[in-house]
Amino acid sequence: MDEGARQRILAAVRAIPAGTVAGYGEVARRAGLPGRARLAARVLAGNDDPGLPWHRVVRADGSIAFPPGDPWHGEQCQRLRAEGVVVQGGRVRGQRAAASLDEQIWGP
DNA sequence: CGCCTGACCACGT
DNA sequence: CACGTGGCCAGGC
């Protein structure tokens, strides 16, 4: 895969403010790769940086990408709740995955 | 080069 | 809100 694209995606993920979430598609779009949501997912799957806030990335409908029962699922829920994000039924409540990161970063 | 798979998405029912 | 369908893009074989 394109190394540059990967770096931009990682940067976009790090740009997500704590206590908020963003969709894979949004992250990809913010990285300058519209329509590459799956690429974003792949990048996170292979990421090794422990400082990366990957837990703030959820699906477009606000649900956790991992299936319930999966170790990573609980991990993500726990980290999100630790930041004040309301997780219920395996999905984020109170604030759907931001339609646009700018809206979360630059505010309403 | 073709075929299958996947931390996805939008849309209609 | 839950499900099913079709589309898209990269990887692995």
Image (tube, coloured by chain):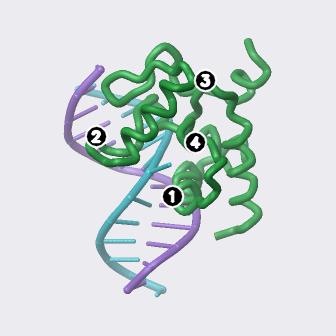
Chain colours: A green, B cyan, C purple
**Disc 4 and disc 2 in contact, CB within 8 angstroms:** no
Q: Secondary structure at mark 1?
A: helix
Comparing labels 4 and 1, the label whose residue is closer to the camera:
1
Ranked by sequence position, the earlier of labels 4 and 1 is 4
- Residue A46 higher or lower than A103, as above or below: below
Considering only order in the chain, which callout, 1 or 3, is on the residue closer to the N terminus? Answer: 3
Pinpoint residue B4: horizontal percent, then vertical percent.
29, 71
Mark seen at residue A19: 3
Q: Which residue is mark 1?
A: A45
Mark 4 vs mark 3: tell me if same chain. Answer: yes
Q: Between marks 1 and 2, how big is the CA–CA gap?
A: 17 Å
User: Residue at (44%, 32%) from the top-left corner?
Assistant: A78
Q: Amino acid at mark 1?
A: Ala
Q: CA distance from mark 3 to mark 1?
A: 22 Å
Label 1 crowd (10 A; few <14 / some 14-19 / many >=20): few
Q: The disc labelled 2 sits on which kind of residue?
A: Pro
Residue under label 4, please give it. Answer: A25
Give residue A76's mark. Answer: none
- Do the numbered discs 3 and 1 sit on residues whose CB atoms are within 8 Å? no
**In the rendered image, which quarter contains the C terminus of chain A?**
top right
User: Mark 3: which secondary structure?
Assistant: loop
**Mark 2 — residue?**
A68
> What amino acid is found at the position of numbered circle 3 in the picture?
Gly
Residue at 71% from the left image edge and 21% from the top image edge? A103
How many numbered marks, from 0 up? 4
Residue A96 in the image: state x and y as whole percent.
51, 21
Give the letter of the chain under mark 2.
A
